[in-house]
Image (cartoon, helix red, strand yellow):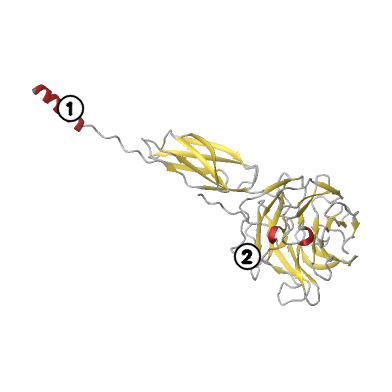
Amino acid sequence: MIIVVAASALTVAGLATTTTAAAASPTQITLTASNTAPIVNQSVTFKATLTSGGKPISERITVYHYLNGKRYTDKTGYTTLTFATKFTTPGVRLYYATFAGNGAYKASTSSKVTVTALLGVMKGTGPATTYGAAGSPVLVAADTSGHVWWTYAGSESGWTSIGGSATSSPAATAPNGASDNLAIDVFVRGTNGAVWYTATTNNGKTWSKWTSIGGQVVAGTGPAVCSWGAGRLDVFVEWTNGALYHKWSTNDGKTWSGWQNLGFPPNGKLTSSPAASAGGSPQAPNQIDVFVRGTDGTCWYKELTGTAWSSWKSLGEQLAPNTGPGVMGAGFNATTDVPNYAVFVQGTNHQLWWQILGEPGPYPFDNAWSNLSASPEALSASSPAVVFSYSGHPEVWVSTTSGNIMGCFWAGNWTPVNTWEWFYTEPSLP
């Protein structure tokens, strides 16, 4: 009995001296990206590192990203995880790395890394803009490979490719001039120097096959297009002889006229892509004004009223080389029925200038050039694009030397609200 009791006492004593398991050690995980603003198809390298007490530890790391509210798994590895990826579509992606933890080490999550994959606009080109569904502004642009993309300005869903092989800035219009139209027509200069176009009638769900309407467009320039009535499409280009040429369809592009030579400004040839807009006047629905940069570097225009074209008229203002004007119909005078146009150019100071051309008005930009605030990035050698939003405020969109697209809108004066902004909307993690 004594021996048994002693054994029990030893056993109890042994249990009393057993030590508890060590507490799990804290960990730190970092994630970096070699470029947080790549253009489409540009490689980005990510590096995730897991440490504890400042020393690397060999445990499982996983890198995820969110795009449009959905989570995707990118890579899994140990200690230091390095991988490269390319983005085939523009948009904002939020990356982070995680360690799930175990008995020895506590779980940890890295800080978020936001990567904005940019369209990477083709050098020397700018965006096009027009009305989409319910009057919402649409943007169209060509990437560095010549593929054409479209999106609603400010859309979280990002850009959608419509293919093509563009060698110029695109041009776009909502046929019939209806601000609530689900139809959009897009025109570009193709690799053979001719004009090509595609169209949607269902708000971009499907697009027609790219079709050529011919032409001999000067390299470095692109077409302009506008629509003043049902089925009507009017296309303008700088021909290889430096003159302005015009072609039109009266049945939504099913058949086309021949090319009409509209001649040169008095000072010589065109030196830019043209810009065109229909005035939208009830009494003169088929009035079109076309604007160009002339050999003297200034802005010239001529207008179609009925079936007759006016002579060339000068608006003055020196435009930067390799740029052209942008224009949008800005309503009309209800008494005189004279249409107004909002005309934008990039001046030789590489800032935007504008005026309302038409009836005299009370503002300094009525029939006189006025300077907009400078953009935060240098403008590329391309033409601005102009549209009136569903709220009735004009918007102007430009490309920059870094390949980005930026825009500002009218807010009672041309001081941009919240300055010039990316139109990308950053998604949030759930």
Residue 18, position in %: x, y?
A: 23, 31
Q: Secondary structure at mark 2?
A: loop
Q: Amino acid at mark 1?
A: Thr
Residue 232, position in %: x, y?
A: 83, 59
252, 54: nearer the viewer = 252
Seen in the picture, residue 129 relative to 20 is either above or below; the reply is below
The residue sitting at 37% across, 41% down in the picture is: 26
Seen in the picture, residue 112 relative to 248 is either above or below; the reply is above
Q: Amino acid at mark 2?
A: Pro
Drawn side of residue 188 relative to residue 150, left or right: right
Residue 286, located in which quarter of the rendered image?
bottom right
Residue 6, position in %: x, y?
A: 12, 25
User: Of tags 1 and 2, which is closer to the observer?
Assistant: 1
Mark carried by residue 279: none
In which quadrant of the rendered image does the N terminus lie? top left
In this figure, which residue is indicated by the disc labeled 2? Answer: 416
